[in-house]
Image (cartoon, grey):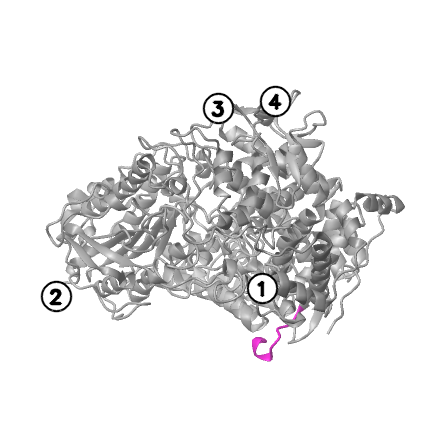
């Protein structure tokens, strides 16, 4: 049989081993050091986004003091070790999501700054491309994966007839087209295997793969010709998906002798077993996958959703918390609820801090991966009780290779567009994008003087 | 343009005059009363709207944001028929005009005359041009359909689609809706991996390879010839239609190129079969387009796929393909016979799968263990119980279909399906195993019908306690098809939590909340329904008291009807059985068509409902009604030339 057995690391037996295995994860540290023979030809800047549903306790979020002299709030306290790597903008809002319902609009519109169309599916439209995808387009072709989308929960079940939105909206923040939300990976094993596939491609298979993909592309064109105009776009989406795969095969087997190589080799034995039962462990593994993707330079863009819109994940595993996230976010200003609500937000920040710690330990040249990243943490609404998209809770971490002036708490005029932050980040990422959605210009004080 | 086809009902031997009599006897008294009235004329209907609705619902500040001032003729109502259908329900239920001293109220006969007129008008409008079908189907297979299709092709018994991204839901709330089956860049990559895994496994497995290696190279048969035979049968099965010579030649070319590149026979064949499995012709259900303004029959093979993905979530079997080849499926009688075959003996696994896909998404019980997990303070919950809870509605529905029972069993029944763990939960004595079995519950009035099922009661609760509001909303939305609107903006969230300071009951607090007319508008019809289910705890266990207080499960609906406890609540729903069944018909038609329903489907739903009313609400009649319906059997071209190729 031609196909070598080792390509099927996804063996049936391994699959059956299941999720029970312990998942202490020393593997990031244990991995091979940077390959000396493949110096980075350029400074690779990464962009990560961590989306948290349901907002924060308002009075325990905003840091005290402004500019470089500020003290982190209770909720942000886990970020203390990275204080000089942080940018905390206060008073930004997402005007486009100040309509519609309490959650879906604020989730799907978080990175687009546009208002989604009210839809149960037909004519679904985010009316914008998310800013991470604009960044992805900018570095397209330099890494095998244009971007990676990660999440914890599967796409929420059903449509919400109460408010008239399909729950697809509440389950996606990344949109490569206004009508195309990007599917997320929620299983850390599958995310790991995907990275393994792209970092160690079977180059001997390349010519055979090309034949196969050519056949598929021809079939797609043939099918397209037989369809009505409206239906052709779906087949176009598939055509594009196959072409991307074809490009990746090319990238790995470039005949000119400069095939793409991972910045670091992965260790297949560190493959996670599957989706862990515990929420905390699941989150931790998925964030490890983001770190691994950045470390190997498999992609430079990665978004992650801690939960879908209206997520009612049970946080009873935290001390002093009993109940679901969404239920507690409707705190009615009662101290007992606020207290729990705050602990949940702080836990999210602690996971973020843990990711930053990982990235800061990954050396790349004389810097760390964190130094070359911008990792945005945020929620689509501020206070879960009022579903208000004003003064959004946002933090950016990482200097983006020196493009961002970190170590600041910046207080802007109330109702400064969130899109201004995105324009700034896209500039720091190296794009020439000057306006985005309702932006009025980059946020002052963030970008380093070039 | 095609005119509506009168649906040609099958003649089931077991039903007949008796069913007609029974149906007549079952007509609730108020309908009988209503039919003695003369319905309004169109003019009277418009006058009613102007007289009773517009005074509040007009600019500058229309009540509830609803402006009805522009509806001065029939045409304008016809244009917004779906909205009027909702208004109609409010008027019929006595919710509108609101019970307020300053608001003029129509008397009961006027109200009924209006309702009858509007209902008739909307129906006639929807059906005026005949029942119109939708566009040709074009959708990606969803993850579970993909797995079933691979299983069918290769006879492999693992979940080939396990690594694919999961799908969201659209339209009527199902994850087979064309509109939400997106394609991301990740898809082709996953399909390629999945196809390779499955093909490699299948070639190595003797039993599996029997399914598709229909020829082997030998002294008599050349490698080319053998590959050609394998491919022509594989392509037909994969594309679910007949293959033309050119398509076979295309894949033979790939096979030969692989051979020429140095692969051996089996490797080249593997690679070629993998290519078939990532072709969009396999991954999409793609029907041929229709010329602008035309209505044509769905072709025979297309019909075979519509049938099999509807009832099995899998590709057509040989019988269906054979009947399609003979052109028999266009005959509605044969379609009906196929339905009965397809849910009958020998297809338990497929029908169980269909029941699960349909029921868990319709009822929302798929959320159990996912979006809904009970709080740690709720004792007794574990994965074993979760399994038993999730099984119950699925097995129950399967029984409805397989034994052709009355759909009204969904409202109330004297049997259900429980396994060992659930029997302990329900305190039902008897011998049970892991596999749920049918159990007679005549002696247990607390169970029977969807509303006595633990899974339903759980997903309509908060994780830490029951919620009359959520349960009431569930009944309105899921059973009656009447989802309440969201709370108006800036209304503070209702405090349903136990308050230690004041020992007031939840019922008292909800009653207080309803003193606010803005809240009362909807909560008057939501909350009572939920209170009727308060005897069930978060996990659906029966309880007589809570925190030392006896449970009060009484309620009064806006139209004045009273009930106490789940049994009387079920009777109330039984009085509205046609509304419940209408909603079921809609959901299932949406599922069968793999898309959301539009107004043009309204008429098909009504005619299926009429047929069900005349046939004892037989479960088979529902399936037959759907597959014989115009939207299932026909497809329509786009309205405009520019949308056509």
Chain for disc number 4: B
Frontmost of labels 2 and 4 is: 4
Secondary structure mostly taken by the magenta-highlighted segment of the chain: loop
User: Can residue A299 be seen?
Assistant: no
Side of A322 relative to B448 (left or right): left
Q: Which residue is mark 3?
A: B547
**Measured along the vertical axis of the image, is residue A316 above or below residue A137?**
above
Q: CA distance from mark 4 to mark 3?
A: 21 Å
The magenta stretch is B636-645
Frontmost of labels 1 and 3 is: 1
Nearer the N terminus, badge 4 or badge 3? 4
Instruction: Please tell me how crowded label 2 is: few (under 14), some (14-19), or many (20+) other residues with Cα within 10 Å.
Output: few
Q: CA distance from mark 2 to mark 4?
A: 73 Å
Q: Which residue is mark 4?
A: B427
Q: Are marks 1 and 2 on the same chain?
A: no
Q: Judging from the image, what secondary structure is the residue with disc 2 in?
A: loop
Side of B109 relative to A25 (left or right): right
């Amino acid at each position: 049989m031609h196909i070598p057995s080792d390509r099927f690391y996804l063996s049936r037996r391994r699959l059956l081993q299941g999720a029970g295995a312990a998942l202490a994860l020393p593997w990031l540290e244990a991995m091979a050091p940077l390959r000396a023979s493949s110096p980075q030809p350029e400074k690779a800047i990464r962009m990560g986004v961590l989306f948290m549903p349901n907002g924060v306790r308002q009075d325990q979020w905003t840091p005290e003091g402004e500019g470089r002299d500020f003290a982190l709030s209770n909720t942000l306290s886990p970020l203390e070790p990275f204080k000089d790597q942080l940018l905390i903008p206060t008073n930004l809002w997402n005007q486009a999501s100040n309509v519609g319902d309490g959650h879906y609009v604020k989730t799907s519109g978080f990175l687009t700054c546009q208002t989604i169309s009210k839809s149960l599916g037909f004519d679904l439209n985010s009316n914008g491309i998310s800013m991470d995808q604009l960044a992805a387009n900018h570095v397209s072709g330099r890494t095998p994966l244009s971007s990676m989308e990660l999440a914890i929960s599967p796409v929420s079940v059903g449509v919400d007839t109460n408010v008239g939105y399909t729950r697809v909206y509440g389950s996606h923040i990344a949109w490569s087209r206004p009508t195309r939300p990007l599917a997320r990976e929620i299983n850390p094993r599958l995310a790991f295997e995907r990275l393994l596939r792209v970092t160690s491609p079977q180059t001997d298979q390349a010519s055979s793969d090309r034949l196969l993909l050519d056949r598929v592309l021809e079939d797609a064109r043939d099918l397209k010709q037989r369809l009505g105009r409206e239906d052709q776009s779906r087949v176009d989406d598939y055509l594009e998906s196959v072409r991307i795969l074809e490009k990746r095969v090319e990238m790995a087997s470039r005949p000119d002798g400069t095939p793409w190589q991972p910045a670091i080799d992965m260790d297949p034995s560190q493959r996670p077993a599957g989706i862990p039962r515990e929420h905390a462990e699941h989150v931790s593994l998925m964030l490890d996958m983001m770190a691994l993707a950045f470390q190997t330079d498999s992609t430079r863009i990665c978004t992650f959703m801690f939960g879908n819109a209206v997520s009612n994940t049970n946080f009873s595993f935290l001390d002093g918390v009993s109940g679901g996230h969404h239920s507690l976010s409707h705190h009615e200003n009662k101290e007992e609820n606020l207290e729990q609500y705050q602990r949940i937000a702080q836990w999210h920040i602690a996971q973020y801090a843990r990711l930053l710690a990982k990235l800061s330990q990954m050396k790349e040249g004389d810097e760390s991966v964190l130094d070359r990243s911008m990792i945005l943490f945020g929620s689509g609404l501020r206070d879960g009780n009022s579903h208000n998209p004003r003064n959004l809770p946002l933090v950016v971490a990482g200097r983006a290779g020196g493009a961002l002036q970190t170590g600041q708490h910046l207080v802007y005029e109330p109702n400064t567009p969130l899109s201004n932050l995105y324009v700034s980040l896209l500039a720091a990422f190296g794009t020439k994008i000057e306006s985005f959605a309702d932006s009025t210009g980059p946020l002052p004080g963030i970008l380093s003087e070039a | 343009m095609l005119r509506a086809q009168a649906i040609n009902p099958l003649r089931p031997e077991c039903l007949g005059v008796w069913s007609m009599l029974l149906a007549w006897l079952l007509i609730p008294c108020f309908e009988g009363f209503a039919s003695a009235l003369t319905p309004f004329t169109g003019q009277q209907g418009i006058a009613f709207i102007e007289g009773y609705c517009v005074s509040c619902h007009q600019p500058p500040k229309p009540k509830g944001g609803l402006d009805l001032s522009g509806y001065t003729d029939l045409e304008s109502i016809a244009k917004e028929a779906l909205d009027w259908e909702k208004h109609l329900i409010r008027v019929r239920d006595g919710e509108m005009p609101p019970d307020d001293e300053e608001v003029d109220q129509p008397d009961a006969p006027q109200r009924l005359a209006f309702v009858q007129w509007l209902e008739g008008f909307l129906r006639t409008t929807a059906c005026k041009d005949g029942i119109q079908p939708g566009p040709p189907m074009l959708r990606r297979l969803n993850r579970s359909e993909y797995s079933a299709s691979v299983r069918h092709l290769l006879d492999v018994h693992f979940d080939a689609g396990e690594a694919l991204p999961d799908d969201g839901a659209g339209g009527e709330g199902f994850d087979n809706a064309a509109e939400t089956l997106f394609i991301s860049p990740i898809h082709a990559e996953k399909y390629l991996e999945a196809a390779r895994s499955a093909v490699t496994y299948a070639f190595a497995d003797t039993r599996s390879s029997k399914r598709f290696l229909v020829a082997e190279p030998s002294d008599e048969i050349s490698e080319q010839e053998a590959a050609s035979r394998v491919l022509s049968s594989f392509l037909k099965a994969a594309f679910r239609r007949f293959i033309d010579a050119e398509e076979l030649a295309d894949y033979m070319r790939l096979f030969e190129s692989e051979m020429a590149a140095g692969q051996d026979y089996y490797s080249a064949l593997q690679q070629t079969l993998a290519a078939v499995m990532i072709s969009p012709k396999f991954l999409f259900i793609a029907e041929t387009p229709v010329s602008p303004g035309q209505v044509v029959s769905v072709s025979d093979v297309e019909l075979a796929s519509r049938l099999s993905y509807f009832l099995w979530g899998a590709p057509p079997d040989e019988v269906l393909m054979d009947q399609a080849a003979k052109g028999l499926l266009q005959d509605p009688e044969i379609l009906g016979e196929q339905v009965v075959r397809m849910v009958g003996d020998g297809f338990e696994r497929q029908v169980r799968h269909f029941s699960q896909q349909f029921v868990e998404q319709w009822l929302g019980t798929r959320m159990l263990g996912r979006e809904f997990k009970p709080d740690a303070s709720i004792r007794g919950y574990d994965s074993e119980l979760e399994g038993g809870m999730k099984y119950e509605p699925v097995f129950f529905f399967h029984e409805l279909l397989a034994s052709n029972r009355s759909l009204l069993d969904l409202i109330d029944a004297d049997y259900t399906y429980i396994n060992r763990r659930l029997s302990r939960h329900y305190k039902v004595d008897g011998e049970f195993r892991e596999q749920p079995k049918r159990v007679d519950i005549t002696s247990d009035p607390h169970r029977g019908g969807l509303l006595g099922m633990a899974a339903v009661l759980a997903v309509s609760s908060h994780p830490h306690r029951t919620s009359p509001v959520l349960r009431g909303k569930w009944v309105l939305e899921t059973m009656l098809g009447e989802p309440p609107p969201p709370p108006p903006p800036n209304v503070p969230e209702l405090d349903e939590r136990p308050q230690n300071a004041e020992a007031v009951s939840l019922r008292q607090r909800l009653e207080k909340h309803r003193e606010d007319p803005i809240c009362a508008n909807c909560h008057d019809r939501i909350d009572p329904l939920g209170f009727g289910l308060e005897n069930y705890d978060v996990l659906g266990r029966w309880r007589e008291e809570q925190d030392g207080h006896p449970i009060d499960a009484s309620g009064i609906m806006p139209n004045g009807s009273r009930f106490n406890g789940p049994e009387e609540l079920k009777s109330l729903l039984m009085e509205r059985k046609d509304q419940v069944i209408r909603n079921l018909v809609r959901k299932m038609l949406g599922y069968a068509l793999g898309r959301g329903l539009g107004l043009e489907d309204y008429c098909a739903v009504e005619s299926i409902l009429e047929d069900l009313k005349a046939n004892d609400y037989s479960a088979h009649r529902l399936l037959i009604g759907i597959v014989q319906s115009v939207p299932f059997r026909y497809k329509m071209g786009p309205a405009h030339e520019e949308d056509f190729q």
